[in-house]
């Protein structure tokens, strides 16, 4: 008995550049449309919880501000499940004395909400409420920290999440159970589904496959260093997904030319795959490389990748789920099952939570990204001092970094070397229980492209939706 | 066979001053908690549709602004289902060249969204999409109107509402079917449930009871003049709900003293009831007065109200649903059924849609509110000129007015006379198909009170919610 | 010995629509250019004093806010001597915790600064400092009033004005001494030069001519009701200036057609002159009408005006200062001197300062503007309650009203009747010592026109300025 | 015949922390008060010119925006001669369609205005107007540069500066002529008086002493590399001013302990002086060190400094202008005159204007500040690309750097080594003709301290000002 435990899509990118996120071809979870739009409303519940908390904080300040919260220090931002760059930096509370207290604020996208992280990292409702209590919302005029528990709203906020906390179960096209629950992005949050869903899946299945968003450098590192510890998970193998197209891109080919055979570019791009394989070893993990086949891939290209993996000491298998469904991955499944038949888990975390924040950040940047050095802006250094002061140093690290490069610069492809990672700002999620260093130009609220996919989405009189995928 | 067709509650007030809105005592719709929190997610779908549209508009301007929309003229505001005064007036698009185009904006509460109004006034998905196409979002630099259809996003927005458009059916404590669908407020929107839900109920039942929010002056007037025409409804009777407590309040008694018997105050307050009875006649409607009994009411007080109704030519019945459930209203039911046994509908709309906007507004204010005169601020006059210019004059009127008084001043109790109604601004919902004159100090985004009810809401480890009612 | 005591021009309008303001033809004060640009720097000193005070207030709040000033209640705005609509409504203090406290603010034009009013209404440096002490800057969180004296900055602000308080003396083309000092606009402030300049002129001359800005309804009313009492002046006669062109305009002729003879229009416009003559009588004043001749006026037109004045009981004389200098007004001078040879002053103020603010405002609107009634917006009523609460009711009234009409609507020409004056807001200048009801759409910061006169201004290598007049 | 050519003080610091800036003891320029307050109004004229230009730009955009200026790219900020942190970052143009176009803006202090720089770097009125024409105000939607000449306002702005351009002459206590003209700060602008004043002084005197603000690293470097080339000056000697107190401070002594003798600290601090002496040599200049004596200095301390200078190959002299006036500097004068009796000027600029901007910045940072390396933030790199694109690479460099340290970190005292200079942003003054790299946390608008000196300033009835010094 097998099941998958994966994330829910966010509406923002669906209307933006990415289209739906429920699979494709013969490899889908159903009902596809619902999953891509509102699904069971979990995202909306997170949005509601996040923003009711924000309203309650501003209302506290407006109505006498008994806790003496300094409005300029509020760190709790609002969220919306939409790609909306206009809401990144706003001024609220305008319109005169009766319309709130003016201050600078902004919206992040819902998957970046600390509430989403908490939902995914809580083992039960009790823990959820406790984590909500621990959320930092801002500071007093005397620089004392203010948490949700100081305001007393943890119960109300938890009540809003009571149902969202429950894992959702749907199925794949081939009727495998699929737990689709929780949706943090991997570039700006922890990038994996909920602990509760995975645990439920583990109880019901012999094998559970979960996914960790974007590259190994983002989703997997966070899964191993944060989620596995909070969820007490010990995964037995990594299935590293590679595509000829992505390797070609890392080898210097433009997006529009990825369909053309280009063995040389694939070869050049393999260095990127190599870095991920090195990283897998650093965690002590075993792994099979799944080479996800596209129609335009040539057999030479596919073989080259397979060969490369093997030369590096990893088994590999070409998979073709899109065209053949589950059958397209039988070889991979067999190899993976064989790899873990001893039932052992050798996971070694990359860093010790007890280390200093700066050291932990540097470890990730150097070991996993391959950075030469790490630069903290003066804002980031200020944030670090505050982290120490308020006792958050021992929290794990949840990097915010572009998914387009191993570095923090989206333009550095392949396996960049001698680069500097710049930490611009460090945000603390004291409720979720991690520290978020924000690197490069990564933003926690995406924007829409010039031609948003919303232009193509339609629904007919009978409720048939088109243009979603 | 009987059913009720009522509205869904909004989360904002649930966390604010009002508590839940799913009934009480032996008169409830179930599951109470769910209905009060996220329910089937309709509110969230409306929020998502509204705000994705907003993001798409700002994105159009940011990305070259092909339609030459003047950002200062955008009338499409964002919404959130929360009481949040800080979001009433905001500045968005700050942070430099890459973070959007700076402009003034604001959030209304979700029940005030034109999308909510459209959802409730559409007879089917086709009409929904058409109405979305007709939404006015702003104006060009040359003062030409921009509708959603000019941008081409009606399909995507309608797709987000595909499921929310479907009526929700739940049940009462006594297992009567209850259609709970759509949630526009009656003080700032049309205040009645969806046309589709009522139509569905009508197909399945012999008698359908719907509700129209707040007083007859708000919900009922809008139901008769707007909804009945769009939905092609012809209701047969009005059940006017009166309470001794409310009449006492209109007779000058403070809220904290409403429990004490005070026959004199009830007598004084009856003028308010009288105005509503007069108004019912203006619509040509028959009516029974339902005197909703509270534990603190004396029989003298109850009789006084009953007597007053009869002297004014209306039958009346004391009801006690809270303590007795359906049985508590048997007499009322009999009287009502008797009243409509001829099956006739005599509804006469108050005004002709073909009349001028100013005239229609004045008719409502004078005939239904009892105003002496109506004052249009210079902003309102400017709005009226624009309404004429763009051809919206023949739309019906959806007044935004306080529910606390027949006038636009919440402090004028009883049946005020010689008062002036001030129209501060006039907003057009060209998609929903009505004009919204905003009177007095009414706001389309409420605020939270000093002690929000969220302070009392909690959820225990087993998911039991407390403090919601 | 004769002298004139007039106002200094503001730079804002010089760069905008109006061009210079130092006379023209053979009737000028010299050095014209300097007077029109920076002159002796009085305007700049007022700007500096006003804005240093603003910075000191915001700095107090930023640095601990010992006085508990509620930033949302600050009434002290910044000023700039420029026409700049973009500065009317701004948000300041943005950029994070170290960059001040965010709040809504705005700039008025320097002539509207209360500092300018104080400069013009102070009899000496001691009084100036006292008046500065009395300026209201805002309110505490407990609604207690905060004056400059509570902050202790009156000395520093007065020091900045030490030299600006001293009258400036220049001369006319014919070497008559001209005191040019103080520059409040008459539509938004008291519209007359400084008390000190006029007093100095009175000590040195047999006859002093002062000017009161715009029509009699604005400048003269304020001069008689505010300035004469603060300065203990008793003027002996009014010289009411009329032009055929202005009367034609009030008779319905467009600006571009004012050069064409149009006896009928002049006749129609005379009603406007008639209203001013009536008003002069209400103050008990004697008057000669000075008909200021333009090259395009016909003798029939000029005679018609003269005749009208005489029929109404006032003497009149055609003057031609522009073409002939002082000689062009000899007849007027003789008539005026004759009128006041008894040395008597019969000035009766229009209202008693001891009356209620509402009553005083209504008196001006009805008696001087000819309004039917006066409407106070809800904001204005709130302001009135505050004026009473803080003990400012007995201050005189300094109306802010358009100069283009006797009414508050710039489009109502001639002698409008049956009109309503709307008071939108009421500002208190507790330092200067008056109350400012803001009517209609009048703004305290002008904007520049599409083609600002700055486009034509130039200076050559030798410092010769062109385009200024 | 000797004269001095120095800068005018800014009002902002006078009201803030610094007090007046016209000398002290027996070494003053007179009239002290006037010079410290409004003086001849030059600062105000600069403010007026700067802000009228700003208003004209926003007005252009508001009125149709014929040039298609993208409001988000406007680089022309407003200025005010006041310390006002609240104005650093603001949003303007709020209040609806008629109140301008919303955008982010901010105020710098007047001495940081490009207009001030232009005033000081222009050799005549013609050049002034030309430089104004070349000011960059922003960019079009197509990224084309917009200069003042594109708008056509150079004539009007120059006209406002006609008189301010003329040097002011006052005198010292000992009746030496003193040209006090122009007031750019040295930490954020070029830090020296006007070219025209110095030229005038040179025509009238045998010896002219000018000052270059703050340390040699700021004022002198800019004087030699920017001003001397624009003004075609060739100075013959540097008088480097040192104080025991400052050296002690650089040796680690706190400000409150500077009065106590501490030979060791002086010795430690001498490294700072040493760096300046090295820098003087890099420019090929001869120099005498003037050791400015304070009452609390011991003779051992003074001697130690003198000795250090001599060991480094520079002559030195203790001066005591404060207590003795001119006589206190006779020895210095003699040594200086002797040094330059050959009349030669050996000035070698530090860098070639033709070099790349990055190279020139690095040269200054390394050679004059002693930095190990220089870091450009991503914003700064973006700015550099723009500088290249629009052809401004060959302009000289005007660093904005703290005066408190040789580095860009105010806390690094003495002669810091191995430090990094961070360039945060690079602003172009294409009118004045230089590039401004902004380093560290330096701000172009200061703030007021908790206890501003304005609290102590007063003026009595007779106009005597106290508390200014």
Image: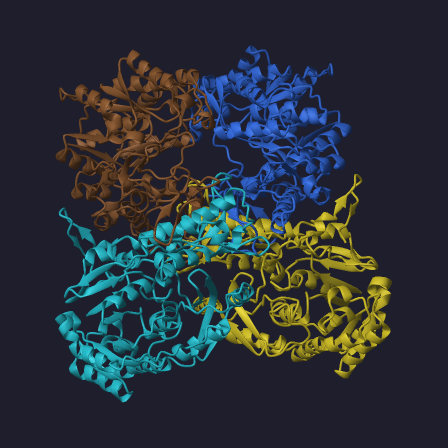
Chain colours: A brown, B cyan, C yellow, D blue
The image quadrant where one finds the C terminus of chain C is: bottom right
The image quadrant where one finds the N terminus of chain C is: bottom right
Residue B40 visible in the current orientation: yes
Q: Is residue C184 above or below residue C270?
A: above
Residue at image location 28% in from the left, 41% down from the top: A116
Q: Image quarter for residue C351?
A: bottom right
Q: Position of residue A235 (x, y in %)?
A: 19, 26
Q: Is residue C307 above or below residue D223?
A: below
Residue D291 visible in the current orientation: no
Q: Left or right of C279: which side holds A380?
A: left
The front one of A335 and D248 is A335
Q: Left or right of B410: which side holds C203?
A: right
Q: Position of residue D203 (x, y in %)?
A: 77, 28
Q: Image quarter for residue B332?
A: bottom left
The front one of D101 and D169 is D101
Residue at image location 64% in from the left, 38% down from the top: D146
The front one of D69 and D296 is D69
Count of marks placed on residues:
0
Q: Position of residue A109 (x, y in %)?
A: 36, 42
The front one of D98 and A244 is A244
Q: Image quarter for residue B254?
A: bottom left
Q: Position of residue B296 (x, y in %)?
A: 16, 75
Residue at image location 65% in from the left, 22% down from the top: D330
Q: Left or right of A394: which side holds D256?
A: right
């Amino acid at each position: 008995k097998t099941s998958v435990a994966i994330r829910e899509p966010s509406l923002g990118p669906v209307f933006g550049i990415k289209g739906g996120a429920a699979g494709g071809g013969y490899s889908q979870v159903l009902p596809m449309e619902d999953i891509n739009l509102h699904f069971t409303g979990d995202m909306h519940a997170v949005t509601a919880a996040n923003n009711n908390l924000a309203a309650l904080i501003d209302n506290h300040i407006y109505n006498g501000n008994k806790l003496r919260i300094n409005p300029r220090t509020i760190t709790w931002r609002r969220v919306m499940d939409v790609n909306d760059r206009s809401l990144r930096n706003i001024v609220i509370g305008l319109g005169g004395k009766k319309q709130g207290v003016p201050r600078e604020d902004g919206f992040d996208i819902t998957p970046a909400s600390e509430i989403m992280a908490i939902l995914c990292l809580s083992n039960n409702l009790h823990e959820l409420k406790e984590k909500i209590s621990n959320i930092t919302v801002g500071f007093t005029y005397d620089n004392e920290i203010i948490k949700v528990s100081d305001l007393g709203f943890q119960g109300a906020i938890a009540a809003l999440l009571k149902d969202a906390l429950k894992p959702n179960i749907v199925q794949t096209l081939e009727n495998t159970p699929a737990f689709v629950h929780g949706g943090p992005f991997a570039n700006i949050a922890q990038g994996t589904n909920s602990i509760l869903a995975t645990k439920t899946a583990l109880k019901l299945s012999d094998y559970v496959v979960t996914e960790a968003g974007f590259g190994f450098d983002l989703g997997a590192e966070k899964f191993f260093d944060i989620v596995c510890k909070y969820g007490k998970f010990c995964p037995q193998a990594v299935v590293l997904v590679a595509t000829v197209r992505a390797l070609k891109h890392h080898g210097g080919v433009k997006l529009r030319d990825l369909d053309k055979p280009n063995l040389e570019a694939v070869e050049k791009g393999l260095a990127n795959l190599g870095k991920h394989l090195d990283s897998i070893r650093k965690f002590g993990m075993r792994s099979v490389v799944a080479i996800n086949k596209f129609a335009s891939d040539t057999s030479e290209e596919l073989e080259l990748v397979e060969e490369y993996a093997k030369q590096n000491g990893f088994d590999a298998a070409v998979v073709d789920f899109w065209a053949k469904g589950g059958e397209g991955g039988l070889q991979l499944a067999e190899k993976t099952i064989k790899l873990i038949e001893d039932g052992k888990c050798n996971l070694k975390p990359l860093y010790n939570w007890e280390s200093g924040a700066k050291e932990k950040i540097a470890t990730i940047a150097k070991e996993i990204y391959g950075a030469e050095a790490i630069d903290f802006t003066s804002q980031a250094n200020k944030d670090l001092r505050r982290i120490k002061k308020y006792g958050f140093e021992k929290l794990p690290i949840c990097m915010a970094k572009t998914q387009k490069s191993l570095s923090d610069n989206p333009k550095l492809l392949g396996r960049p070397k001698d680069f500097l990672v710049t930490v611009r700002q460090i945000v603390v999620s004291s409720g979720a229980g991690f520290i978020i260093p924000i690197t490069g130009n990564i933003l926690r609220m995406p924007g829409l492209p010039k031609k948003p996919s919303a232009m193509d989405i339609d629904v007919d009189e009978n409720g048939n939706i088109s243009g979603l995928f």
